[in-house]
Image (spheres, rainbow, N blue to C red):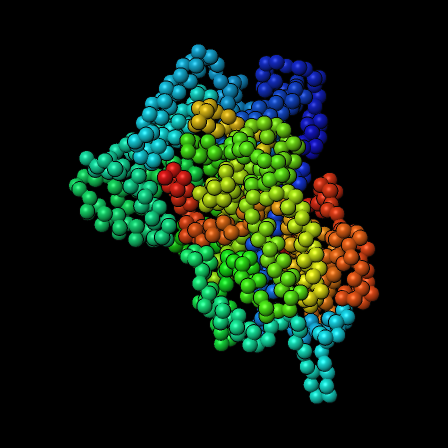
């Protein structure tokens, strides 16, 4: 940021004026240079635009510069540069594409609120006997209505979304064939999808089964004829994932400012496979699949059955000195006391992260190590907390080799999203309270087996320095003949000072008495200092340990 | 990388030790050493040399004649017929359904080995069977230590924890490991035998192990393998069903 300030100071010629209106956007100094108030205004704009979570798409916001004209989604730093070099697009005094309203009208808003709640009441009544697939579309529908109420929009996308949802709703209502009572078009497809995914059915197999099912069903049934058609129907439900190219040596992601590059910055490995004579599209060597967590968390609040449990961590009755859930634990309480603004909203989500390498082709097949990164929601009560339904696959890091220490390169996506979820949050519709609120999320800790612990935390976990608690204060030593590290004789110092076992001279190193005290953990600040001392780390092939 | 999160440095602890793997590795070390499984036991020649170098344990040092070197049987290793007894007992063992996999199928009495133990089988063995299996076969002191470590894991796995009980565990585990140090050889003590010292702290700070271990994730991996492409639909159907 300081670099940019310097650039600006070079440009600065005029005097500082405090402007209430937005004339600063199109007014340069007589020499054609940018004024100070222009720079301040740009900062204000960026702050305003980033404070509204809805503005973000794929991690970027719309760039209203003279060239991009609100068509491109870019990172805020890039946008700042565009403003300084290109200026604002014409007639953009009202920032309508960034959440500003043309004419705020209180009465109209109230009206919409009323209609929404009545719609939801109707829905509640309908809930009793309609099918769950219909409910899920209704939930999703309500979400879109909720958004509309908050910000009467401006652009076309939400409307298109809404139309798609309406289509889905109609789909859901349509019975599978005329006179069918227990299956709708959507529920049938959703159920076949479950079977397909649970049993690893191939696409051809799916098509064949559907073909057969359609021949059994009465004439004029509305079962989608093949997998492609079914998939297109399910698409508007959302919860998509992104495919992001990654250097095969895990040096860098082709992401944000590097999207256009075709060669790795560090190892100069090509991004794409050589083009075959027939192929028209470029195929990347390695692709990372990223499942954004925000829409999945939002979805939790859209189901009336789940949302009531999302505040369990604060609402349950905790007995002093008894721990039944991570929310009773010391770390959780400490976290809450450190961040009162976060803990004030009980719907804010606490997450845990787990990664583990495994071979999707079975342990005896070709060696291949694929690393899924999974997030789990700790808000839920014990019975739901670690259920597979509430663990969100966040990322699949492809093989064939494990990313090792370079896992950080891949985690960049997740960290960016988590940072944004922490600082600005995401606008979410809570179905039980029937209101919109800004959801925030925090990562509490990670769960790993020991080799992955090393990858994620950056601690070595090998040799003498294995123990991440004792760090370098441990007494492990290398065995002369065994050639491995041994933690023999390391435990007596954890005993109370006057314990009789400390005086045992016979059974350990001959004649030694243990007088040392147990090692203390590094304090948070110290640890942070140690970590920040490392500075910039180069990932990929050329990175050492 | 996680240090970039603004709240990360205020967390009390950041990464969890995985109890499941610690328990499994510890079980394998104990079982292989006590049952003297070839290639797996920690009580090998190199270790005996190390023991002679670092410790004062006359009965464990190698005995050298002119022609050959003899390795006297250590007190913690079962005799051959005692081993057979254990394997035969395992062969007859029946569990309630779904409690563990059918361990009797995993026993190979001819080779004197267990094949294909899953993490959960190790968990069941560690918590319930280890003290039964070696009862009366091992000397009292060694059996006591093994039983203590088995009880430690049973206590730390409980889903409802009392803080003062954990503090007691924290003290006891050190004594237990001390007892193991008196018995087992040097190379037995790899990092996995050291980490239980820190487990009570972790449980005290982070909550019951059910929330900070890897069992559910490992189970999920199998699902992920099959469904990761259409995960979104899968989620939908599951959650709203």
Query: In the rendered image, is residue B212 in sight?
Result: no
Q: Is residue A367 above or below residue B8?
A: below
Query: In the rendered image, is residue A48 in sight?
Result: yes
* Front in this rendered view, residue A14 or A291: A291
Q: How many marks?
A: 0
Residue B230 in the image: x percent, y percent?
A: 40, 46
Left or right, B184 with respect to A396, comes to right
Quarter occupied by the C terminus of chain A: bottom right
Give the residue at the far top of this rendering: A107
Quarter occupied by the N terminus of chain A: top right
* Front in this rendered view, residue A377 or A171: A377
Residue A503 in the image: x percent, y percent?
A: 80, 59
Residue under the point 46% across and 69% down: B91
Residue under the point 49% across and 76% down: B110
Give the residue at the far bottom of this rendering: B67
Residue B121 in the image: x percent, y percent?
A: 50, 60
Residue B152 in the image: x percent, y percent?
A: 61, 54
* Front in this rendered view, residue B178 or B122: B178
* Front in this rendered view, residue A254 or A146: A146
Residue under the point 70% across and 55% down: B174
Q: Quadrant of residue A444?
A: top right
Q: Quadrant of residue A113?
A: top left
Left or right, B51 with respect to B96, comes to right
Residue under the point 38% across and 37% down: B240
């Amino acid at each position: 940021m300081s670099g940019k300030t310097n650039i600006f100071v070079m440009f600065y010629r005029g005097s500082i004026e405090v402007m209430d209106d937005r004339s600063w956007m199109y007014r340069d100094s007589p020499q054609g240079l940018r004024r100070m108030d222009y720079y301040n205004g740009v900062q204000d704009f960026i702050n305003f635009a980033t404070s509204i979570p809805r503005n973000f798409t794929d991690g970027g916001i719309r760039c209203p510069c003279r060239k991009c004209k609100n068509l491109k989604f870019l990172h805020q730093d890039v946008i700042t540069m565009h403003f300084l070099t290109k200026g604002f697009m014409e007639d953009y005094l009202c920032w309508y594409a960034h959440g500003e309203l043309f004419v705020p009208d209180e009465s109209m808003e109230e009206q919409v609120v009323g209609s929404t709640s009545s719609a939801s009441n109707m829905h509640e009544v309908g809930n009793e006997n309609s099918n769950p697939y219909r409910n899920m579309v209704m939930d999703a529908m309500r979400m879109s209505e909720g958004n509309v109420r908050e910000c009467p929009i401006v652009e076309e996308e939400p409307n298109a979304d809404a139309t798609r949802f309406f289509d889905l709703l109609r789909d859901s209502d349509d019975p599978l064939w005329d006179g069918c009572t227990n299956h709708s078009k959507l529920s049938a497809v959703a159920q076949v999808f479950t079977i397909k995914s649970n049993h690893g059915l191939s696409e051809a197999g799916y098509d064949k089964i559907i073909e057969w099912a359609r021949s059994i069903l009465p004439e004029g049934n509305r079962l989608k004829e093949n997998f492609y058609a079914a998939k297109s129907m399910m698409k508007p439900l959302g919860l998509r994932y992104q495919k992001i190219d990654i250097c095969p040596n895990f040096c860098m992601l082709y992401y944000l400012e590097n999207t256009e590059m075709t060669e790795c910055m560090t190892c100069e490995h090509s991004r794409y496979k050589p083009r075959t004579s027939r192929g028209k599209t470029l195929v990347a060597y390695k692709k990372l699949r990223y499942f954004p967590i925000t829409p999945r968390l939002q979805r939790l609040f859209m189901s009336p059955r789940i949302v009531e449990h999302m505040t369990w961590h604060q609402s349950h009755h905790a007995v002093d000195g008894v721990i039944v859930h991570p929310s009773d634990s010391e770390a959780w309480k400490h976290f809450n006391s450190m961040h009162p603004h976060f803990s004030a909203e009980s719907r804010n989500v606490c997450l845990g992260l787990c990664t583990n390498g495994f071979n999707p082709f079975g342990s005896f097949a070709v060696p291949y190590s694929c690393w899924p990164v999974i997030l789990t929601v700790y808000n839920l009560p014990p019975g739901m907390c670690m259920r597979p339904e509430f663990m969100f696959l966040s990322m699949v890091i492809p093989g064939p080799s494990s990313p090792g220490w370079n896992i950080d390169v891949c985690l960049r996506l997740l960290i960016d999203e988590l940072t944004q979820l922490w600082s600005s949050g995401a606008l979410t519709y809570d179905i039980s309270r029937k209101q919109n609120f800004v959801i925030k999320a925090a990562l509490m800790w990670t769960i790993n087996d020991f080799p992955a612990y090393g990858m994620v935390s950056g601690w070595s976990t090998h040799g003498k320095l294995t123990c991440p608690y004792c760090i370098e204060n441990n007494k492990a030593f290398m065995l002369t003949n065994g050639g491995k590290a041994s933690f023999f004789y390391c435990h007596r110092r954890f005993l109370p000072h006057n314990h009789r076992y400390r005086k045992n001279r016979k059974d350990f190193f001959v004649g030694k008495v243990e007088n040392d005290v147990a090692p203390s953990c590094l304090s948070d600040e110290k640890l942070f200092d140690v970590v920040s001392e490392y500075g910039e780390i180069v990932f990929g092939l050329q990175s050492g340990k | 990388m996680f240090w970039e999160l603004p709240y990360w440095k205020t967390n009390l602890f950041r990464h969890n030790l995985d109890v499941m793997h610690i328990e499994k590795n510890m079980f394998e070390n104990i079982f292989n050493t006590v049952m003297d499984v070839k290639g797996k036991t920690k009580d090998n020649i190199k270790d005996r040399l190390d023991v002679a170098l670092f410790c004062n344990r006359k009965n464990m040092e190698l005995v050298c004649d002119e022609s050959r070197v003899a390795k006297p049987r250590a007190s913690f290793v079962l005799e051959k017929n005692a081993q057979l007894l254990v394997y035969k007992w395992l062969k007859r063992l029946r569990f309630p359904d779904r409690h563990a996999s059918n361990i009797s199928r995993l026993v190979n009495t001819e080779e004197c080995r267990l094949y294909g133990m899953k993490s959960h089988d190790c968990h069941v063995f560690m918590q319930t069977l280890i003290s039964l299996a070696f009862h009366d076969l091992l000397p009292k002191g060694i059996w006591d230590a093994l039983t203590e470590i088995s009880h430690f894991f049973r206590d730390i796995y409980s889903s409802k924890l009392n803080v003062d009980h954990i503090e007691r565990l924290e003290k006891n585990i050190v004594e237990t490991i001390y007892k193991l140090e008196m018995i087992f050889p040097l190379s037995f003590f790899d990092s996995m035998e050291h980490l239980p010292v820190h487990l009570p702290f972790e449980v005290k700070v982070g909550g019951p192990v059910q929330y900070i271990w890897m069992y559910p994730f490992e189970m999920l991996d199998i699902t992920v393998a099959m469904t990761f492409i259409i995960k979104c639909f899968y989620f939908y159907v599951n959650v709203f069903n």
